[in-house]
Amino acid sequence: KGTASAPITIRSYPGERASIDGGTPDFRNTSNPAWELVNASIGLYRSKTTVWASFVRAWLIDDDIQLVEYGSQANLESTYYGPVSGFKPLYTGPGLQLRSDGRIYIRLQYNPNDLTDPSGKPITPKPANTNPNNNRLAVFTSEQILALVDAEYLHFKDLDFSYSKQIFDVRNGTHHIELDGCRLNYGSYGLVIRDNIHDWEIHDSEFNNGLPDYVYWTDVKNGNNEVAEAYPEFQSAAIEGSIPSFNIHNNVFRNTFDSFDIKDGTTNTSIKYNTFKYHRDDVMELATGLSNVEIAHNMLWHVGSGISIAPSSATPGHVYIHHNVIDNSAYQHGGRSGNYRESDWPVWTTIDPFGSHDTGNKAVWWKIYNNTIVTRRSGYDWNAAGPSPITGNSEKYVYNNIFFVIDDRIIFRDDQVSLGSHYDGDIVYRNMQGSFPFFFDFGDGGQYSSLADFKSKLVTDWELHGLQIDPGFSASAINNPAFDSATIWGRYQPTNSQVFTTGASYSRLNWPEIQGVNYRGALPANSTVTNPPIISSVTSSSVTTNSATITWSTDKASDSQVEYGTTNAYGSSTPLNSTLVTSHSVTLSGLPASTPWHYRVKSRDAAGHLAVSADFTFTTTADTAAPVISAVSAASISSSGASIKWTTNEASNSQVEYGTTTSYGNSTLLNTSLITNHLQTVGGLAASTLYHYRVKSRDAAGNLAVSGDFAFTTLSAQDTSPPLISGVTSSNISTNSATITWSTDEDSDSQVEYGLSTSYGSLSILNSTLTKSHSVNLTGLSSGQTYSYRVKSRDAAGNLAISSNFAFVTAGDTTPPGQVQNFAGVAGNAQVTLNWVNPADVDLKGVMIRYRTDGIFPANKSDGVLVADLAESARARGSFVHTGLTGGTAYSYSSFSYDAIPNYSSPAHAQATPVNVTITSLNPNQGSTGTAVVINGTGFGNLQGSNKVTFNGLTAAVSAWGATSITAAVPANATTGPVIVTVNGVQSNGMTFKVDGRLAAPSGVHVKE
C-alpha cells in the first residue's frame, strides 16, 4: 500500500524494460525443436520437457494451421492417461492436452481456408506442415501474473506482463492504481476486476491477446472434456468488471476477442483517445446499470462488433458515446467447425457496429453523437448499422453521426416516434440498393427503400429535418482492399461546407457539450475540434484623424486580430491578442486623416478554429487642429549661438524665428521632417547680446502652431583670464576639522589642497558650482597639528586660479577614552588571570594595568607596580595572566585606558588572592596499591572538603588532611605517574610516584594484562 502523498512506483530500471513472464520458454512463439513425435500415423507430438501445472493454453499464430477439430479424447488417442493435479487430463481444447506424465501433447491439422477474403484482401499462405516444430506457437501454464488484494496507490510504469491466462486479478477494494506505458500480453484476460475496485488510470499502454489476423471458430475448450457448445478459440477480454472512476486513455487494444466487458455499477468513468484493432467480437459490452460514462475520440478499427449492450435489470444512467470512428467493415470467419452451426463454417461475414447480448433492460440512456460508423452487410442479414439494439426511450439520442454502409445493409430499424427516441442531424449513405430496406420498422413503424421515400411518407413530428444523404461521399475511399478508416477524415473536416449544414435541433438536449454543434461525424482521434467562433456586432468607433477602435463579439472565447488597409486587400494587421475572450476590442493607430479604410476581424478559438468576418469600412476624420507646442528651451548657449528645443503632440515640421527684438527678422531653415521632438541650431550671433525667439511647427494637414516669445543671452567673447582670489581665511578650527573660505571676482568652482607640509597630499572634493563666495570644510584632521593649505578656483572658460600657501593649527585633544568594562581577576596557583572589555572610543591606543598588595588600589598611572602596558583596540576583549605571585596575598589592580596623546582614563579596579599549592616530598615515593603515602608541602588548607589527591589521574582515598601534610592510599589500578593535590580547583605541581609492577604504557602502546 502506498498513500496519496507517497505512492509506490514499480517500474523498469532506466534504460531497460522489465518483463514479467508466465510462459514456458521452450514453446514461446519460436520454431525451437521443442516437440518430439509420438504417433506418426495421426501426427501426435509431445513436449520434450515436463510441465507441472493445473492449466495449459496455446496460441497458434500461423493462419493456416489449427488444432484438430473437437470430437473426443480420440483426437489425441483413446487411452485414459490418469489425473493431472486432481483433474482428468487437461484440455485447452481439441488437439492440446496435459497428461499425468507432465508432457504437453499436441496435434495439428492443415486448414488452408480461402486465400483471399470477400473484399479481395489476400491471406498470406503458410506451409501445410502439421509438425509443431515448424509452426509459431505460444504455450503457457500460468493462471495469473499478479493478484492485487486491498492495494492502494500503486504506479506500474514501463513494464511488460506476458504469457498468462490473465495478467491482473484485482480484488477487495483495490484503488488508486495507475498503469503507465505497460504492455499486457494475456491469454484470456488482461484485468479481471472484482469487489468494489475504483479510481484507476490506465494510459499509454498496450493490451495484446495474440490473435492471428483471422479467427477460426474451432470450439476450443476451457474445461475438461466438454461436449456442449463452447467459446471460440481465442475467447478473451482486456478488462472485465465494474470500473467506477476509471480513466482509460491513449491506449492500444489489439487482437482480442472482446476488449471491455463493463459491468453494472460503473460510474464517472472515461474511455477516451484509445485505439482498438482486430477484435473478433465486441470492443465493448456495456451493462445497463452504467452512469456518467464517457466513450469518446476512440478508433475502433477492423473490429467484429463495436459497442454492444449486455442488458441487466439495473436502472440505466447516462452514457455519452461521441466522436468515435467505428469500423466493423472487415470480414472474418463465422460459424464453428465440428460442433454447433458447423454448416455455417467457414462463412465470411461482418458483425454489428451496435450489438446486444442476452435479455434484460435494453432501454439504456445512451447519447450517441458525432460518431463515424463504417460497416457492410452482415451475415446476420437483418441487423442494422444504427443502434437498433437499444430499445427506444426518451433518453436515447442519435445526433450528427455519419453512417456509411458499403453495400445494402439496413441503416436504422426498430425505433419508432412513439417510443420517444431522438434522431437528428445524421448523414446516412448506402453504396447499393439490394434486397434490404433502407429503414425498417422505423419512425412510424414502416419500411422504406430510401431516405427520400422515408421523408415523403413520414407524417409524424419527429426531428428528422437534419437527416440527409451525404451528396459528396464517394465509396471509393473505403470500398477497396486498401481501406483505412482514417481516409474518411480527409473529407469530413470543418472546411467542408457539407459538414456544416445540419439543421439539428438542440432544444430538448440536456447535456451541454453538443449544444450548437454544427458539424457531423467524428474528427481525428485526440482532436477537440468544435465549431469555429461565430463573429457578430462588428463596429468601428472612436474614429479620429489617425485612429479608430474596432469591436466585435464571438459566441465562444477566442483571440483577437484586425486586418486593415486602404483597399479590401488590406495589407496590414494588428498584433495578435492571444487572450481568449468573447468581447473583442482592437485599436488601429497611425492612420492618415481623411482616408477611407477597409477592415475585417479574425478570431481563433482554443481548438484552433479560425473565423474571419466580412469586409467593413470607416473613414478617418479631417485634421483641423494645429500641433500643441510645449517644453521650449534654449541650451548649449555660447558667445555665438544656441540650440533651441521643443516638443509637439503630433508629428510636425520644425523652424525657429529669432532676433534682438520681438520682431525677430531671422529664421532657421525649415526642417520638413514630421517629428514630435524638435531641435534647431541658431548661429552667427553676437556675444553678450539678448536674443528673442519663437518656434513654429506645421502638421501633415497644414495646421500651423507658433509659440510665444522666449529669450536668451549669448556669452561674452572668449574668456582667458583666471579668477582673482582674495580673502582666504581659516575658521571653525577644532581638533579634527576646519572651514576654509575665500572670494573670487567671477563665478568659479571651489577646491582646497592641504596637508602637514607644503607638499599638501590631500585634496577636497571639487564643488563644481560656479560662485564668487567659496567655502570648503576640511574633516578627518589630526589634533594639535599645523596644516598647510591653498585654494583653487576655475571659471566657466576653464581658467584656473591657485592661491598662495596658508596655514592653521588644529586644537589639542584632552579627552581620555572611557574605562575598561567588566574588569575582573581570577585567582590561580601563584597567578591571577585578568579579563576585561575595551571601551568603544575609536581613538583607544592601549591599556595600562598596575597593582598594590597593601589593600589599596593604584590611584594613577604612576602609582603601584606596573603589571602590563598593552596595545588595544576599541570594543575588543582583553586578557592578561599575572604570574609568579605569592599565595594567600591579596592583589589590588587598577587599569587605565589611554589614547595617542596620551590621555589616561580614570582607573577600573579588580582584586584577587592567588593560592600557592606545592608538594615538596612523598614518603614513600613508591609502593603498591593500598600503600599509605604522606604528601608534604604547603597551601593544602586545614580541611579536605572538595579538595582531592590523584595518582596519575586516579583519585586516592585520604585518611588525614593538614595544611602542610596529607596521608593518602595508592588507589587500585594506579600506575606510575605524578601525584597532584587539587585545592579549591587549583592544582599543585606534580611529583612522581612509582607503583610497583604497574608501569604506565608509553604513548601509543596498549598494555593488556
Image (cartoon, helix red, strand yellow):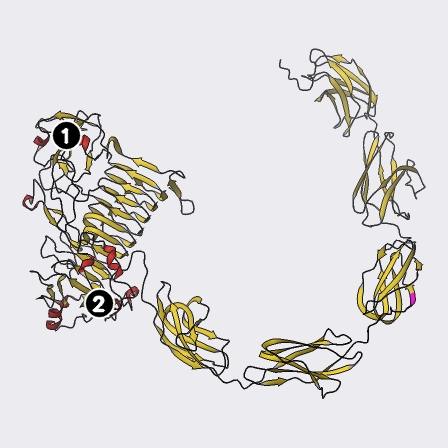
- Residue 927, located in which quarter of the rendered image? top right
Horizontal relation, residue 583 to residue 257: left or right: right
Image quadrant assignment for residue 148: top left
Label 2 amino acid? Answer: Gly
Describe the element under mark 1 as helix, strand or loop.
loop
* Helix, strand or loop at mark 2: loop
Residue at left offset 75%, top offset 19%: 978
Horizontal side of 200 relative to 680 (left or right) equals left
- For residue 91, say whether it is visible: yes
Residue at screen point 82% across, 67% down: 798
Taking the view exactly as shown, the residue that stands out farthest to the top is 997
Q: Are circles 2 and 1 on residues that touch, CB within 8 Å?
A: no
Q: How many marks?
A: 2
Image quadrant in which you'd find residue 360: bottom left
- The magenta region covers 716-728
Instruction: Identify the mark at residue 425; answer none if there is no mark.
Output: 2
- Spatial separation of the CA atoms under disc 2 and disc 1: 59 Å
Q: Is residue 318 visible?
A: no
Q: Quadrant of the N terminus?
A: top left
